[in-house]
Image (tube, helix red, strand yellow):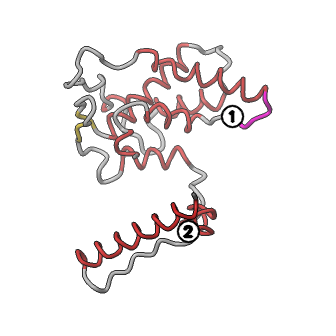
């Protein structure tokens, strides 16, 4: 029952608190909050997300302290960086927007692609962008899924379906994040 689950979670929380006290010293007290805190969400604790999402994405993936630090994924053995993955996805955005000028993509997507290719918003010049996807070493026969290179077209089609249902559509930034999540960077996000 939910009551027993709640007690189990409280017990585990208390055990973790004791563990961290033992490791970090007596002055440490973990605070888990209440159910009401949980339902308030992160915004109540840390504020709303940045309205300049693309600038925040560029900062997080290209300009942060760990942006160019390599790591290797546990599932496919891909050695990469946030910088590499982000800029390779942006190249896909630029190519897809350039290839299909009259594809019905929203004008803000095409404007964003132009800004990316002009290295605006603190992006490095395109000559400095990685050219190839990092290789898989654990399952080299698999490689990366080429269908993902059409992700904007799929996103645009899904957005049309959402509009038809009177639902909010996904933004380009959300599409880029979804695309990134399908690659090695999911390990960092999780």
Q: Residue drawn 46% across and 20% down? A: 148
Measured along the vertical axis of the image, is residue 137 above or below residue 69?
A: above
Tell me if label 2 and label 1 are in contact, CB under 8 Å. Answer: no
- Residue bearing mark 1: 169
Q: Nearer the viewer, residue 55 or 34?
A: 34
Q: Position of residue 58 (x, y in %)?
A: 44, 44
What is the residue that sits farthest to the left in this orientation?
137
The answer to which of 16 and 68 lies nearer the viewer is: 16
Q: Secondary structure at mark 2?
A: helix
The span shown in magenta is 165-169
Q: Position of residue 7 (x, y in %)?
A: 49, 68
Crowd class of label 1 (few under 14; some 14 to 19; many from 20; radius 10 Å): some
In the rendered image, the quadrant that contains the N terminus is: bottom right
Q: Residue at x 61, y 15 (%)?
A: 101
Mark identifier at residue 45: 2
Q: Position of residue 166 (x, y in %)?
A: 80, 33
Q: Quadrant of residue 141?
A: top left
Q: Quadrant location of residue 119?
A: top left
Give the overall secondary structure of the magenta segment: loop
Residue 90 left/right relative to 24 = right
Q: Please rate how many residues cluster around mark 2, counting C-alpha atoms within 10 Å: few if below 14, some from 14 to 19, many from 20.
A: few
Instruction: Look at 45% across and 30% down and name the residue there.
Output: 90
Q: Earlier in the sequence, mark 2 or mark 1?
A: 2
Is 134 covered by the magenta stretch? no
């Amino acid at each position: 029952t939910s009551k027993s689950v709640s007690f189990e979670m409280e017990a585990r929380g208390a055990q973790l608190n004791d563990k961290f006290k033992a490791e970090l010293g007596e002055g440490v007290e973990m605070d888990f909050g209440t159910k009401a805190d949980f339902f308030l969400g992160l915004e109540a604790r840390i504020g709303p997300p940045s309205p300049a999402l693309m600038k925040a994405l560029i900062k997080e993936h290209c300009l942060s302290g760990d942006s160019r630090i390599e790591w290797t994924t546990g599932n496919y053995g891909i050695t990469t960086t946030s910088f590499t993955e982000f800029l390779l996805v942006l190249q896909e955005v630029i190519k897809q927007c350039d290839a299909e000028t009259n594809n019905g993509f929203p004008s803000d997507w095409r404007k964003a692609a132009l800004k990316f290719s002009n290295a605006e918003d603190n992006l490095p010049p395109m000559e400095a962008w990685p050219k190839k996807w990092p290789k898989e070493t654990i399952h080299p026969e698999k490689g990366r899924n080429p269908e993902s290179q059409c992700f904007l077209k799929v996103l645009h089609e899904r957005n049309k379906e959402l509009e038809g249902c009177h639902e909010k559509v996904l933004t380009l930034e959300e599409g880029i994040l979804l695309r990134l999540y399908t690659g090695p960077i999911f390990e960092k996000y999780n």
